[in-house]
Amino acid sequence: MHATQPIAVEHGVMSFNEHSEEASHAEHVLSLILDGNARIRHGDDITLGAGVVTLVPAGMPHRLLSADNLEAWWLGFCAGCLDIDETHPLMSPFKRVRSGMPPMITVEPARRERLLFLFADLREECQRNTPETGIVTRCLLLLILSEVNRAMRTDAPSAAPLTDSLTTRALEYIQSHCLEKISLQDVAAAVHRTPAHVAAAVKKSTGFSVGEWITRNKLQAASLKLAHTGESVEKIAVSVGWGDVTHFIRQFKKHYGSTPAAWRKQVRANHRTEETV
């Protein structure tokens, strides 16, 4: 992923039966399954097949458990680098997943060809790397996101339970204010419910506590800074709300499996490898 072109697109086929390691990315990741099937762990174990778009918001842990002749397109993008965040209307599918909904949307056969064309066009434009590539690739990405949004609206019945739920409003508040010093009491006040009510609702809907969601959002912000800025670990820790750098490093390692410095080194090494392919 180039600094001036913060989008990566791949197409491939894979098969394996061994569980992969849990992963999380500084980028938002979207994939379109063309054939075969796969099992992923994203909270629960989920089976995916042809015609499904999967979405993994930046910073959210997930695991690919198995793949059987899985043919898919994969798209990763740095939302912040493109001046897009999850308040953008076309980022609603990612926002839905972060709110606790399953990370997949079914695309009707009539719309798959359109998505295939956009993926292929985006990859071709990324490979050109001309002066206008940045503008063109951003536009193509937005068109892909618009197709996914249309598919999500078609899939509306499964999205309905959390569309305007207490949990969604609580998680939206956490996402918007996670870099502030907020607590369960602040979240409860924002959604006009008692702390006990909010705590129980969020835990029941998502499997994670309010405190865990606050921590996850802070760590997501930290991962983006680590991957895409040259700021020191100490400065990043303070910027995302940790006064104790040692505690920040401990929490980051617990969530991502390595220290912030080691994680940054690996992410950047992976990016350099992509640039040479």
Image (tube, rainbow, N blue to C red):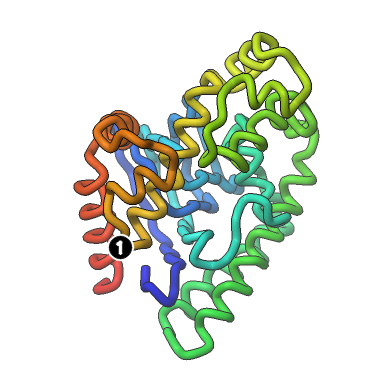
Taking 259 as reference, is 47 left or right? right
Please give the residue where the numbered disc 1 appears in the rendered image: 230
- The amino acid marked with disc number 1 is Gly
Q: In this view of the protein, can residue 17 be seen by the observer?
A: no
At x 65%, y 59%, the residue is 145
At x 47%, y 60%, the residue is 78
Of residues 218 and 101, the one drawn nearer to the viewer in this rendering:
218
Q: Where is residue 29 in the image (x, y as percent from the top left)?
A: 48, 52
The C terminus: image quadrant? bottom left
Q: In this view of the protein, can residue 256 be seen by the observer?
A: yes
Would you place residue 90 above or below residue 59 in this image?
A: below
At x 66%, y 35%, the residue is 173
Would you place residue 110 above or below residue 240 in this image?
A: below
At x 45%, y 47%, the residue is 221
Q: Tell me the SS state at disc 1.
A: loop
Would you place residue 62 above or below residue 212 in this image?
A: below
Of residues 104 and 22, the one drawn nearer to the viewer in this rendering:
22
Image-quadrant location for residue 89: bottom right
Q: Where is residue 48 in the image (x, y as percent from the top left)?
A: 53, 37
Of residues 88 and 139, the one drawn nearer to the viewer in this rendering:
88
Q: Position of residue 245 (x, y in %)?
A: 28, 37
The N terminus: image quadrant? bottom left
Q: Residue furthest bottom?
A: 131
Would you place residue 164 above or below residue 37 in this image?
A: above
Q: How busy is the neighbourhood of tag 1: few (under 14 within 10 Å), some, or many (20 plus)?
A: few
Taking 70 as reference, is 230 left or right? left
